[in-house]
Structure formats: structure tokens, C-alpha cells
Image (tube, rainbow, N blue to C red):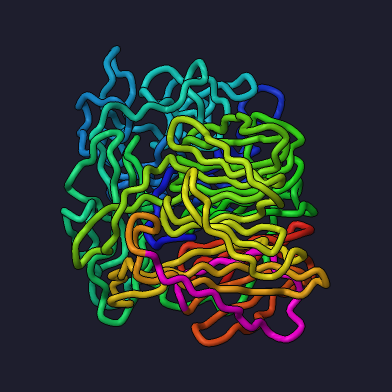
Amino acid sequence: MRFSARGGLLIVALLVPAAVLGGCGGTPEKTVGGVGDTCAGDADCRSGLACRVGLCEPTGTSLAGDACQLTAECAAGLYCSAERECARAGDGAAGDSCATSADCAMGLVCASVRGELSCANAGTGDLGDACSDDLDCLAGLSCGDASGGMVCASGMTTRDGGTAGDGGERDGGVEQDAGQPYDAGPGPFPIGGNVSGLTSGSVEVTLNYTERLTLSANGPFTFATLVDRGATYAVDVSEQPATLRCTPSGGRGVAQAPVPYVAIDCNAGTPVATWEPVTPPPAAITRRFNDVWVADATHVYVVGPVNAVLSWNGTTFRMESLPTTGRTFYSVGGTDRSHIFVGGSSSLLLFYDGFRWTESTVGTAQTWQGMWVPEGRSASTAPFPVVTEWIPNTVAWMVSSGGRIARFDGSAWTIETSKVGDYLAIDGFDDGNVFIGRNVGRVMSGRAGAFTRGWDMGGPTTEYSGVTVFQSEYDDPLTDLVDESAYDAVVVGSTSDGAGVIVRCHVDNQPEFFDGPTPVVTWSAETPPVGTMALEDVWAASPDAIWAVGEGGTILKYDGTRWAAQTSGTTEPLRAVDGIDVANVWIVGDQGVILRGR
């Protein structure tokens, strides 16, 4: 299940070119043009630079959340942060005191000057150039020891403006000394992001249903209201352009640091029509990918065997560095990019907090096959989404072979034991309305401690391996005003002879599943195209945009009237599908197959 507004976290690969860290001592040579080097075309310049009037130069066009190495690569008002992403710069002038470069105006860096941390002009040293301290390097770089020589490098920046850390790579950037997680300070923090695809009119966005901004051009934006550390934030589209549909992603979470990466995508009105293959890292080229979770338009997570957790940064996939080895991962989900859960074999659970992965176990000898992490939602009034409950962004659900249901309430896991069968998939409308697919022709529904509803939908040999739950009725489709009284669950699977099956449950007139009048629940069988093979997973963006995937490269799309096959370009089994809206959908499968909807 996915709602349109999503929380976020900065997660970008550490961008240290091989030319900087390669070699045996001394200052490494740059193999492509750096800032100011001569060039005949963009190919003569290193990543992040372009050939301008015969010289390699940063373009200054990267937006908030885009990967960067130099501050000069970022658009006006942004700087290249320690996480190697363009983020909102401060307003500190040269000589003003600072804690990090985020306090300083664009182009200035926070450095030790005469023993005091203050904003100062950066130097001119590019990647690989010799240096003695950070002030010798271009803004966004730092001076560090690489293979015995002090050089300007990307990814060595400290988070306190002082002594460089140990340079150990991790998923959100770089560790501090002693490997402590990044502490952004006491807050409060600014919330902002970027608008794209706004070709006409204006879009109104709101922060926590209070402050409103009217945006009439593409580019970065920042709310004036600051959010306290540990407080929830929600960025929504409150008024759409006349002829466009804008979708927010990365817009919900808990503020632990400045949030500059909320994406308002005004291209989201065009549903996926074709599928293009995306190449995984060489180490995962033949893996069977078991699950995919789309955090936002530029951050996607894929899991599979042999310790495969892959992350997409908008351009390429990379293998995450994990604290465990040799495991197989079956499920992944999150509320935002600082709360990501991965379930695996041997009861393994991984959790990503925005800076590092940690390992634990839940249960004994479980294989955590399915994952659902409810997004945060809060009560509101028109013209905002009419919803009824705030779900803490640390709640998570998992299901396993052997019939276990596990729920994390923010502090501890609770495990329930089933009566029979394997649990293969889980999704929900909210934390009290959860659906589970099983391998004995049965679908269950309930909430923690009360999975009392069950339906025998296909006989004991039918296996239900995919579930999606979504809002099925809207007061106003353009603005997403929601009637909370109705939702649907679509469940997919296969019969014993390998044929695909699809069933749908419509629940009406019951916003609180167990605490009011008996809901009207209607089950019906859907009709897939003739010859549809076994189906593995299903995901809905809206009532008229649902995708199901399965054996033989099968992709089906429901358009509100019927299911029709789409061309996948592969005959490999497809195992999982996920997205954030009709224009951002991903599919994964066997033999390293990753498909991106276009």
C-alpha cells in the first residue's frame, strides 16, 4: 500500500572517484578534466562538470536532493552537504560563527579560523589536488589523507566543522570519529524540497496543514516554519494547477535534521505505459530479486540473496554495505528514508536509520516473506485529505513462512502464531485494517492481537502471494479529498496448475474496522487475460491504476475497467512491484531483472 505523500531521508552513495583514492601514495592524477581544465566536450570532464567555452565547469543546476561533489554544482541558495546532496544553505557571511557549512551562505564553508569555527571563503583545489586544510579546497570538498597524501576529496567532510572523521564509508555519507551517527543538532529544522514538471499555472503546498506556499515555477522551495527535532512533518499538495496533477513524495517523516528533499512532481499524471530495464551492479547481475520498495521518485530499494540490498539514487543502483554476510532478503519497506526495514532468512531483520544499517533477529527460524510499514497520516479538515489516525513512523509489520505475524510498535516486536499455513504477503489500509495472503487459499484481516476475519477464497491448493490495499473512493479525484469510508484489497496468486488468480475485497461504510458498525465487505473474482500465469505480487496507485506481476515476465495493468497485459521484455519470473504514484512504478524479478516504468 502507498499513499501519495512520503517521508524522506538523505541517502546517496559516497562519491569518491577512483582517481582520488587510487595509486600508492603521493597525489593521484586526475584522468578526466577537473574544474578549469580544457575540454572539447562534456565527455572530457569528470562527473558533475560540463564543458563550457572550452573549460570544465560546474553547471550550478543541481536541485535540492540531487547528488553533488561541489557546492558550485548546486542551484542558487544550496550547498553540497556532507551527505553528498544539494541542500539548503544558510545565510552566514564570512566571519560569522557556524556549526556546519549549512549555517553559511552558498559558496562559504564552516572551518576553523584562528581556533574558532566561522564561515570562510573556500579555496580553489579540485578533487585530487594537494591541500593542507579544508580552506585549500573548493566548497563541498574537504582535505583528507588518501593513500598517504593530503588531497581535496569528496566524502571526507566532517559534520562538526572541525577535525575530519575516519572517512569510513556508509550509506548516508561518512562516519564521524568513533563511528557515531550524524547528529544534526537540537533543531528546529527547515523543511523544503523541489518542484518539477510545472509547465503552467501554480501549485499550492502546505506544511503540517498550517503554512501554505504558492509555487509558480520549477525549482527549490523552503517553508518559513521550522519543525522541532523529533516532531512529525507532513508536506501535501493542497491546490493543484488547472491542467496538471502534482504528486508529493518524501513529504512525511520525523524531523531529525534539515529536510531539503521533498519532491513535488507535476509530471505524475501520465501513467506508466512501457517498461525499461535498469542494470543492477555487477555483483548482483544474476540475482533473484525478491522485493522492491519505492521511497520516492529518486530512491528505490531492492533486496535479494547473497546479502543483496541495492539502493537507487536517481541515476544508478549501488550495493549497500551491511553488517551481515551471506543472507537472503525477502522483504523491504519503510515510512521514509530514515526508517527502512528489511526482512530475511533465519529471522534476520535489518534496520536503516538514515546513517547506518543495524542487524537484529525477530523470532526463531523465521523467513520474513512479507513486509508492510504504514505511512504516517494525521487528522485534518478540507481542503486537505480527510483521514482519521496518525500512525507513528516506527510501526512495522512482517509475516513469515510457518505462519507468524510480527508487529513493531516503536520499541519492541510482538509475534503472533498462526493456526495453519504460511503467510506470504501483507498490506493494510491503516494500522488496524491489515490484510494477509496465505498459501492455503485463505485471506486474513485484522489488527494486532485480533486477526479474527478470514476468507477461504480459492481452496487449499491456491496460494495468495501478493496483497495491495488502497483508498477506493474519493470526494474529489483532482485534489485527493478522501472519503474514509471505503477501501479495496486486491489479492493475487496462483492455483495448483500454475494459473494466475485475482480476487478483490471492497470494504464500505466503516472507517474504524473494529470499533463501529459491522462493515459491508464484498469479495469478488477478477478476470485476468486468458492464459495468465501464476501471479506473485500486486500494487495499486489508484482505483484505475493497478499492476500485477508474475511468472514468465507477466505484467498486468488494471485501468478501472479490465486487466490487460503489458510487454515486459523478459520471460523471467517477476517477483515484486511497488511505486509511489501512477508515473513512478518499479518491478523486480529473477536473473537481475529490474524494470522501471516509463
Residue 360 part of the magenta segment: no
Q: Quadrant of residue 537?
A: bottom right
Residue 174 versus residue 493 in the image, above or below: above
Could you tell me if residue 402 is visible in this image?
A: yes
Please state if 482 lies on the left or on the right of 322 as rendered: left
Place of residue 247 in the rendered image (x, y in percent of width and height, measured from the top left)? 37, 66
Residue depicted at x 39% and y 36%: 139
Magenta span? 518-543
In this rendering, the count of numbered labels is: 0
Q: Nearer the viewer, residue 455 or 469?
A: 455
Residue shown at the point (41%, 61%) measured from the top left = 3
Looking at the image, is 18 positioned above or below residue 435? above
Q: Nearer the viewer, residue 520 or 162?
A: 520
Residue 52 as seen in the image, left or right of residue 91: right
The vertical placement of 342 against 384, above or below, is above
As displayed, is residue 366 above or below residue 62? above
Residue at left 31%, top 69%?
A: 482
Q: Is residue 114 left or right of residue 450?
A: left
Is residue 525 shown in magenta?
A: yes
Q: Position of residue 351 (x, y in %)?
A: 55, 36
**Residue pictured at 24% horizontal, 76% vertical:** 201
Asked if one can make out residue 67 in the rendered structure from this viewpoint, the answer is no
Which residue, as the protein is rendered here, is positioned at the far top?
A: 115
169 or 422: nearer the eye?
422
Q: Is residue 575 left or right of residue 426?
A: right
| Quadrant location, the C terminus | bottom right
Residue reaching furthest right? 497
**Position in image of residue 5 (x %, y %):** 37, 58
Q: Position of residue 253 (x, y in %)?
A: 36, 45
